[in-house]
Image (cartoon, rainbow, N blue to C red):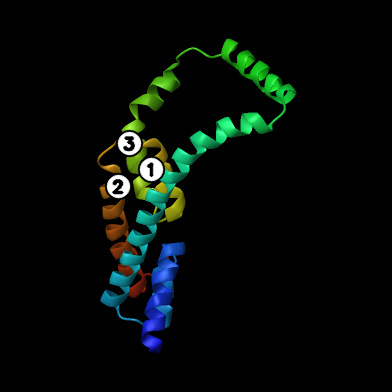
Amino acid sequence: MPELFKLFSIFLMAMVKYFYSPFYAFATGENFWLSYVVIVSGGITSFSFFYYISTFVNISTKFVKPFLTYVISEKYLEKVRRKRSLKKSRRRKFTKRNRMIMKFKNSGMFLVIFLTPVLLSLPVGAYILNKYFKNNKLAFPGAVVAIVVEGFILCLLVWRDIPFI
């Protein structure tokens, strides 16, 4: 039974912070393949959960905003409207930098997919992917592949005792 608790704690660690879970699994004394399977399953479970929950959050915020207009005073709303109109009148033109940002929008998705398991946390990456790249068919499968591949690389680096980590 203690073995099951160790595996469950590795699973929970992979759900919370994916990058540190191979170190934790190595410290608990588990073997490579069992730890790899538990870490990847925890990462995929966490990413899937937060990806689909963020859909609900994005939809529900559309209904919260109209409700807040009834709660907030009219004086404050008028102040906000004036600031928005000033910003609209001072909008910048379409520059070279903006064109470059638009060109790299798809590579931005792949950058988020690549950085989610290692640098970003899985909930943050899932929310960003769902918010900005929801209609792209490669967003969710690409993130799952990144979790699997980066989990293997992290586990391999930890179990091979490479000194630069």
Circle 3 or circle 1, nearest the eye:
1
Which quarter of the rendered picture does the C terminus lie within? bottom left
Residue 147: quadrant of the picture: bottom left
Amino acid at circle 1: Leu
Report the disc number at residue 129: 1
Q: CA distance from mark 3 to mark 1?
A: 12 Å
From where the camera sits, is residue 120 visible?
no
Amino acid at circle 2: Phe
Is the Cβ of the residue at disc 1 closer than 8 Å to that at disc 2?
Answer: yes
Q: Residue at x 28, y 77 (%)?
A: 34
- The mark nearer the N terminus, 3 or 1, is 3
- The mark nearer the N terminus, 3 or 2, is 3
| Rendering coords of residue 29 (x, y %) | 38, 83
Q: Residue at x 32, y 71 (%)?
A: 38
Q: Residue at x 28, y 60 (%)?
A: 148
Instruction: Tell me the residue that label 3 is attached to.
Output: 107
- The mark nearer the N terminus, 1 or 2, is 1
Residue 19: quadrant of the picture: bottom left
Q: CA distance from mark 3 to mark 2?
A: 15 Å
Q: Is residue 123 left or right of residue 89?
A: left
| Rendering coords of residue 149 (x, y %) | 27, 58
| Rendering coords of residue 35 (x, y %) | 32, 74
Instruction: Tell me the residue that label 2 is attached to.
Output: 140
Q: Residue at x 64, y 30 (%)?
A: 70
Towards the viewer: 106 or 86: 86
